[in-house]
């Protein structure tokens, strides 16, 4: 790549460009002995490298901005006092100053450039150019995005989107401009560019481009989804939506099925396709017996983040002292049971919404009708047990539209409409699966959940006898093969069903309050009747 190739982006005086380095090159670059601080990676006992990302061990949603201009004014789902989306408007003049900070940081340096694809479908994929001065950041995007062949790289041409990562720089005028902090992850859809400053966290690049796919694809009539996906040998595809801790990665990693992808997918006229070329899994308390696929994927070419590693390279996956959000990125080929790239499948016939209900109200499985599918998709509910540090034992509810509100660029109802449109076209069925707690005070056993998933995937759940659970009006089976029957109706897990009733009314009120945010348009208002009723 010519040294002047980055001048159209404002970057000048580049000393050297290392374009699409091999994994061996990356290993050598990120472990150079002269590197210091967050730039240096450490080799571990498993062969994977480990890096630390400083104060940002996750995304910084309060520092995310999108330029408000003619391209975005009437399309973006903007942050308001009533709607807490992550899409905060940024004026073009401030963008220009932020961009200049990044340009100055990258100019005159030895830079890494990674050209990659987002999206396994050639018709709708984004050609993305990542520019950074830190080798392990180049490693991260090499893992996470689809790597072009030699021929594709030679004919890559101009990118559709550019990401300039200036993690070492910040924006000094942030207080004057009324911004959250000196750090930023900002997007300009007119310039087709993301700029990053002040944060070393690799996920800002991954989720930033996902947010852009969430902008472009639904406007083309394609569903854009925060979900995992797998298929059986016959090609029957299932997709799994779920927030952190619900079992999305674990349950979609099935030894009897092939993984299409673990996090981000589209669904078009040809079927479901992965956006990514790798996986980004949590590693806190990683157990090789419980999650063997992830554990065995941690080897040479994988990149660990914020994991505790001693001076000899020994890993302690149980140590969350830096963060509970310890991670690993690895090429998808590190998984044995995987659809070989390009990671695509046919149309999904099963759509599974995973929740971990700590209130002890929702059933372990329910069949959803057309309207309920959209309602629960927009609700994106899960709940966690609160910490006991201050003696608080009440569950903490989380509602995240479309099971990924932080990454939605358009109004949430748009994603619900696109999903249901695709489902209706092929006669797909949706199910709500609760991997959380019930009246026993214990979490639903993993073997029961796996048998429930099996019943969904093989279709036997459709022949099961059912009843309707009051308040939430969910149709639930009363008998499933190899599933403990006493848990299928959550009321049966309480010594006194009145306890369930009281908790159900409380949780229903939270659902109703949350859904009010989507009734600002007629379609959202129409879906209220599909939710719980008090």
Image (spheres, helix red, strand yellow):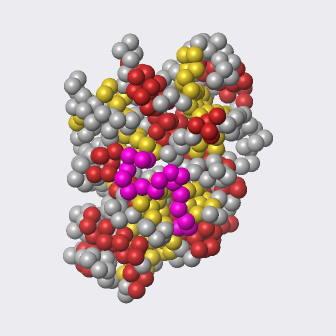
Residue 124 visible, this angle? yes
Residue 397: percent from left, percent from top: 40, 56
Q: Residue furthest right?
A: 70
Q: Is residue 222 left or right of residue 36?
A: right
Q: Is residue 42 above or below residue 287?
A: above
Q: Which quadrant does the N terminus fall into?
A: top right
| Residue at figure coordinates x 35%, y 61% from the top left | 254
Residue 129: percent from left, percent from top: 61, 33
| Residue at figure coordinates x 46%, y 56% from the top left | 339
Q: Quadrant of residue 50?
A: top left
Q: Is residue 327 left or right of residue 168?
A: left
Q: Is residue 8 above or below residue 248?
A: above
Question: Could you say which is closer to the camera, residue 222 or residue 159?
Answer: 159
Question: Could you say which is closer to the camera, residue 2 or residue 465?
Answer: 2
Residue 432: percent from left, percent from top: 43, 69
Counting labels gives: 0
Residue 475: percent from left, percent from top: 43, 80
| Residue at figure coordinates x 66%, y 20% from the top left | 2
Q: Quadrant of residue 346?
A: bottom right
Magenta region includes residue 88: no
Q: Main secondary structure of the magenta part?
A: loop
Question: Could you say which is closer to the camera, residue 164 or residue 258?
Answer: 258
Q: Residue furthest front?
A: 151
| Residue at figure coordinates x 47%, y 59% from the top left | 229
Magenta region includes residue 340: yes
Identify the magenta region.
332-348
Residue 516 visible, this angle? no
């Amino acid at each position: 790549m010519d040294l002047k190739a980055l001048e159209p982006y404002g970057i000048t005086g580049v000393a050297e460009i290392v374009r699409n380095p091999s994994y061996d090159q990356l290993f050598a670059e990120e472990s150079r002995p002269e590197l210091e601080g967050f730039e240096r990676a450490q080799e571990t006992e498993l062969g994977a490298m480990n890096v630390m990302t400083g104060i940002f061990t996750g995304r910084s949603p309060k520092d995310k901005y999108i330029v408000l201009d003619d391209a975005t004014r009437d399309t973006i789902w903007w942050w308001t006092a009533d709607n807490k989306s992550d899409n905060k408007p940024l004026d073009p003049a401030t963008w220009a100053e932020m961009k200049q900070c990044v340009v100055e940081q990258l100019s005159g340096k030895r830079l890494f450039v990674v050209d990659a694809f987002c999206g396994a479908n050639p018709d709708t994929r984004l050609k993305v150019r990542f520019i950074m001065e830190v080798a392990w950041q180049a490693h991260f995007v090499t893992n996470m995005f689809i790597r072009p062949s030699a021929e594709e790289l030679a004919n890559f041409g101009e990118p559709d989107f550019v990401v300039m990562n200036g993690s070492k720089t910040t924006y000094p005028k942030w207080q004057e401009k009324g911004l959250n902090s000196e750090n930023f992850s900002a997007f300009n859809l007119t310039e087709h560019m993301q700029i990053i400053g002040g944060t070393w966290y690799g996920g800002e690049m991954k989720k930033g481009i996902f947010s852009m796919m969430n902008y472009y694809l639904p406007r083309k009539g394609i569903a854009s989804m925060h979900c995992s996906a797998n298929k059986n040998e016959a090609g029957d595809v299932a997709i799994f939506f779920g927030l952190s801790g619900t079992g999305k990665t674990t349950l979609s990693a099935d030894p009897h099925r092939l993984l299409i992808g673990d996090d981000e997918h589209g669904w078009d006229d040809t079927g479901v396709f992965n956006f990514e070329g790798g996986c980004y899994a949590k590693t806190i308390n990683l157990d090789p017996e419980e999650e063997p696929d992830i554990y065995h994927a941690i080897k040479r070419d994988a990149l660990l983040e914020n994991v505790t590693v001693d001076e000899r390279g020994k890993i302690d996956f149980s140590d969350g002292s830096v963060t509970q959000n310890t991670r690993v990125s690895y090429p998808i080929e590190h998984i044995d049971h995987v659809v070989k790239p390009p990671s695509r499948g046919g149309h999904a016939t099963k759509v599974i919404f995973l929740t971990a209900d700590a209130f002890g109200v929702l059933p372990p499985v329910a069949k959803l009708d057309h309207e309920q599918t959209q309602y629960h998709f927009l609700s994106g509910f899960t709940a966690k047990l609160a910490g006991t540090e201050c003696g608080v034992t009440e569950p903490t509810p989380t509602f995240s539209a479309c099971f990924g509100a932080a990454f939605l660029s358009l109004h949430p109802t748009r994603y619900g409409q696109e999903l249901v449109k695709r489902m209706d076209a092929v006669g797909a069925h949706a199910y709500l699966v609760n991997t959380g707690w019930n009246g026993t005070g214990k979490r639903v056993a993993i073997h029961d959940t796996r048998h429930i998933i099996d019943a969904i995937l093989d279709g036997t759940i459709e022949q099961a006898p059912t009843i309707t659970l009051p308040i939430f009006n969910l149709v639930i089976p009363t008998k499933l093969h190899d599933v403990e029957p006493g848990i299928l109706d959550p009321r049966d897990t309480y010594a006194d069903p009145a306890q369930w009733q009281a908790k159900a009314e409380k949780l229903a009120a939270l659902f109703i309050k949350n859904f009010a945010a989507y009734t600002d348009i007629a379609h959202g208002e129409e879906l209220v009747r599909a939710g719980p009723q008090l």
